[in-house]
Image (tube, grey):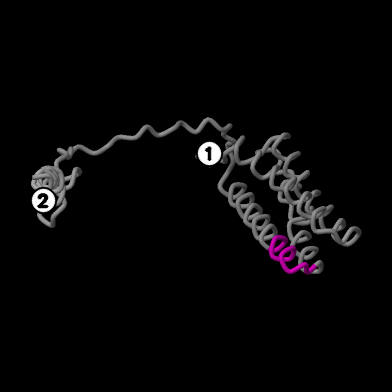
């Protein structure tokens, strides 16, 4: 009698579970009605300050930024291998000699704040190159690189270049 009751309870509890999980069973997402309307996501407004420039200035600044990013890659690779010559070479690539902001025509379009931050960033690359020679310390180089990258992030968060017609 006791075994019959256990069998009865097992059949009441187990059979629906097994039947519900078989190959022909519907999954919960199959029971959901799907909308055919496209989902509209809100696009945030770009609230950065627009700087109106001509196409040549924009291209020069973007090229300069790519040079800086290439320098950062070279510095990180140099730090990983602890190749101080590679770190210096990469940092100098983006130093003051690479600054397009020094061009008075570009400077007039970009504005004083933008140019100041750009020049500070170029100077920081030059300082990093000198620092690696003087200290030969990875932590110092990485802290200096973090400062440089803070300038990059600050610039990209604050401004956007817009070609004026």
Crowd around label 2: few <14 · some 14–19 · many ≥20 (10 Å): few
Q: Secondary structure at mark 1?
A: loop
| Tag nearer the camera, 1 or 2 | 2
Residue 164's disc is 1
Report x, y in % for residue 152.
Answer: 67, 45
Report x, y in % for residue 94.
Answer: 73, 56
Report x, y in % for residue 132.
Answer: 85, 60
Is 133 left or right of 41, judged from the image as shown? Answer: right
Residue at the front extreme?
A: 1
Instruction: Look at 80% across and 63% down and name the residue there.
Output: 88
48 or 23, nearer to the observer: 23
Instruction: Say whether residue 154 is magenta.
Output: no
Report x, y in % for residue 80.
Answer: 71, 65
Is 31 left or right of 126, judged from the image as shown? Answer: left
* Numbered marks: total: 2
Residue at the right extreme?
A: 134
| Prevalent SS, magenta region | helix
Which residues fall within the magenta stretch? 74-83
62 or 127, nearer to the observer: 127
Instruction: Look at 17% across and 47% down and name the residue there.
Output: 27
Residue 19's disc is 2
Is 116 left or right of 32, judged from the image as shown? Answer: right
Along the polypeptide, which appears first: circle 1 or circle 2? 2
151, above or below 92, in the image:
above
| Spatial CA span between label 1 and label 2 | 68 Å
Residue 136, image quadrant: bottom right
């Amino acid at each position: 009698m006791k075994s019959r009751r256990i069998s009865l309870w097992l059949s009441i509890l187990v059979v629906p579970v097994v039947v519900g999980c078989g190959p022909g069973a519907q999954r919960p997402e199959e029971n959901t009605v799907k909308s055919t309307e496209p989902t509209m996501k809100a696009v945030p407004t770009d609230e950065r300050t627009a700087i109106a420039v001509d196409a040549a200035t924009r291209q020069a600044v973007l090229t300069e930024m790519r040079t800086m990013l290439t320098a950062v890659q070279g510095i990180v690779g140099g730090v990983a291998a602890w190749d101080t010559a590679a770190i210096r070479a990469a940092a100098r690539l983006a130093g003051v000699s690479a600054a397009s902001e020094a061009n008075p025509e570009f400077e007039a379009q970009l504005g004083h704040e933008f140019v100041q931050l750009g020049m500070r960033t170029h100077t920081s690359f030059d300082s990093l190159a000198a620092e690696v020679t003087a200290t030969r310390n990875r932590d110092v180089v990485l802290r200096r690189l973090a400062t440089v990258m803070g300038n990059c992030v600050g610039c990209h968060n604050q401004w956007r270049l817009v070609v004026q017609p």
